[in-house]
Image: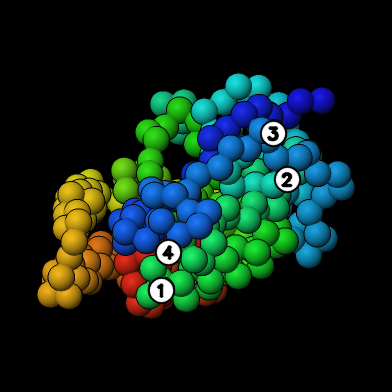
Amino acid sequence: MRGPFGGIGLVALPAALCLWLALPAAAEAKASGCHSGAPVSIRETGPASLTGSLEAGILAQYAVLRRPAMPSDSLPAINPAADTIEYSLSGYYESEIRQVLARPDGERFFIVPGLPRALDLPPLRCVPKKSRRSLQKLKEESLKRSVEPAYCVVDLGGRPSIGPSACVTFAEVPDSRRLFALPLAGGPSVMLVPDGVSSVRVTGPGSLTQTLAVSENAYLYEAPASLVRRRERLIRRLIEAEPKKHPTAADRRRQERAEHAAFLELKQTEPLKAEWLAPSGEVLRTIGRPRSSSLLSLFVP
């Protein structure tokens, strides 16, 4: 049976990774087997429908995955999320797709459990020497993640966003990493929490505090509009600040300083911490803003 993610999809690296690889690599793209610009690949088939189910240890933590599937959990045969899922997952558990949240305007959020697809990254020789260590680390992390059960969030009826993949391994749930990521178009972030968490209190940036209800093991976070506009301005400034074709050492240092300054400004738009709350209000877990050392780390989970 053809699932909701079959077909042909154009699969590219995340936007920020493309920018990071393409700009410095263009001058060195003459290496054998390399090409200028960001690498892309074509997937001729969608992710496989996996047999069986998620591990018992995962099912034991999430009531939404243990309950019987309902008609509302079915994704449409043709949906705008298909390309995203084709890029993100090599296989998925069709029987465990669940709708977790729905808005009055008809926007609906689903989780699609499965196995992550390893990133199709270029050979190390195709990027500048100074970037190869980061690329090698990304390759290793991608291969490690490709065998860890994960879930992707599908947003039907919402505003498209550009940013980190909406997929998280179940092992990463306690880190709430998508809460601290940067969706560039200000789209909502839906995240899972285990049984026993009834709400999530998000503090920051600044003195802002929001307490978000949990339903079906999921909660929805949206950054305030003023922060979204600030992020978009910073990203636009970064994208438009193209380096010179033949930069001097001084030009490269200026570029690096500008990128670092933008990195520090972008960090100020993230929440400071999140707290998982029990029905009694007891704090079950506190997650602080992760430490990031580079601009790339803000975009690539």
Residue 147: % across, % down: 72, 61
Question: Rounded to the nearest whole Å, what is the CA distance between mark 4 and mark 2?
Answer: 30 Å
Q: Is residue 279 visible?
A: no
Q: Nearer the viewer, mark 4 or mark 2?
A: 4
Residue type for callout 4? Val
Report the side of 46 relative to 285 (left or right): right
Question: Rounded to the nearest whole Å, what is the CA distance between mark 1 and mark 2?
Answer: 34 Å
- For image coordinates 18% across by 61% down, the residue present is 246
Q: Are marks 3 and 2 in contact (CB under 8 Å)?
A: no
Q: Secondary structure at mark 4?
A: loop
Q: Earlier in the sequence, mark 1 or mark 3?
A: 3
Q: Which mark is residue 45?
A: 3
What residue does disc 2 label?
91
Local crowd at mark 1 within 10 Å, few (<14), some, or many (≥20)? few
Q: Secondary structure at mark 2?
A: strand
Residue type for callout 2? Gly
Q: Nearer the viewer, mark 1 or mark 3?
A: 1
What residue does disc 1 label?
129
Q: Earlier in the sequence, mark 1 or mark 2?
A: 2
- For image coordinates 57% across by 53% down, the residue present is 120
Q: Which mark is residue 248?
A: none
Local crowd at mark 3 within 10 Å, few (<14), some, or many (≥20)? few
Q: Are marks 3 and 4 in contact (CB under 8 Å)?
A: no
Of residues 287 and 257, the one drawn nearer to the viewer in this rendering: 257
